[in-house]
Image (tube, rainbow, N blue to C red):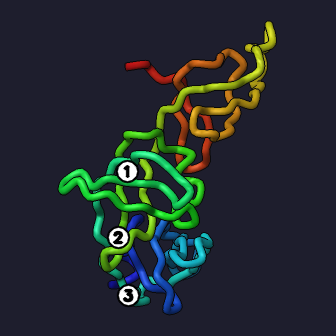
Amino acid sequence: MKATDLRQGLGVKIDGKLAVATGVEHRTPGNLRAFIQLKYREIVSGKTLEKRLSSSDDIEVVELDRRTMEYLYSDSNGAVFMDSENYDQITIHADILGDALLYLRPNTEATVLCNEGNPITIELPSAVELTVTETPPGIKGATATNQLKEATCETGLKIRVPPFINPGELVRISTADGSYMARAKGD
């Protein structure tokens, strides 16, 4: 596949290593030749790297099986997911998941990417809703400035929220950078 046809979420082989493309940007700087800036995550090492590709470069694409699975719970072996189609349960080790578990509540769906039947990573939605469990009380009159305070969510994720957020409130969080987006409407 040509580098210009790459898109986010594709499985690729770069320098002989299996990776998942996390960002693809086509750049044309001034009077220079156009290039593709590829951001990818190596599966084995978990490192996020970037590579500059020419528009005419060929990239080996690896077929990844996308399965919708429900996150059930975590234990000492890792996180247990259940396949939504055949109800099979698999355990994905914590080193494969990284910080992704901080964005998942039990009984939520996620897309698990598999290569040759083995889970290699999960795709998170662009935003998740989590309940704030712990945060210091807001300061009166702090709404005039753009101040943020530390908050801990139900999954253990630590984020920065505006002073009017109190424990027990549902907030929307970006999974790209872990930032507060807005208050969420409860079910």
Q: Name the residue under label 1.
A: 110
| Disc nearest the viewer among 3 and 2 | 2
Q: Which quadrant of the figure contains the C terminus?
A: top left
Left or right: 67 as drawn, with respect to 108: left
From the image, tell me which residue sits under label 3.
Answer: 60
Quick one: 145 or 85, which is closer to the camera? 85
Give, as a three-letter code, the residue at label 1: Ala
The amino acid pointed to by label 3 is: Glu
The 10 Å Cα crowd at callout 2, few under 14, some 14 to 19, many 20 or more, is some
Q: Position of residue 111 (x, y in %)?
A: 35, 55
> Mark 2 — residue?
114
Q: Which sits earlier in the primary sequence, circle 3 or circle 2?
A: 3
What residue do we see at 68% from left, 39% from top? 158
Disc 2 residue type?
Answer: Cys
Residue 147 figure quarter: top right
Residue 137 screen position, x and y as percent: 76, 15
Considering every residue shown, the one lying at the far front of the view is: 76
Q: Which residue lies at the image location 42% right of the left edge and 57% below the top edge?
A: 123
Foreground mark, 3 or 1? Answer: 1
Depth order, front residue of 155/79:
79
Given contact means CB atoms under 8 Å apart, are the residues at marks 3 and 2 in contact? Answer: no
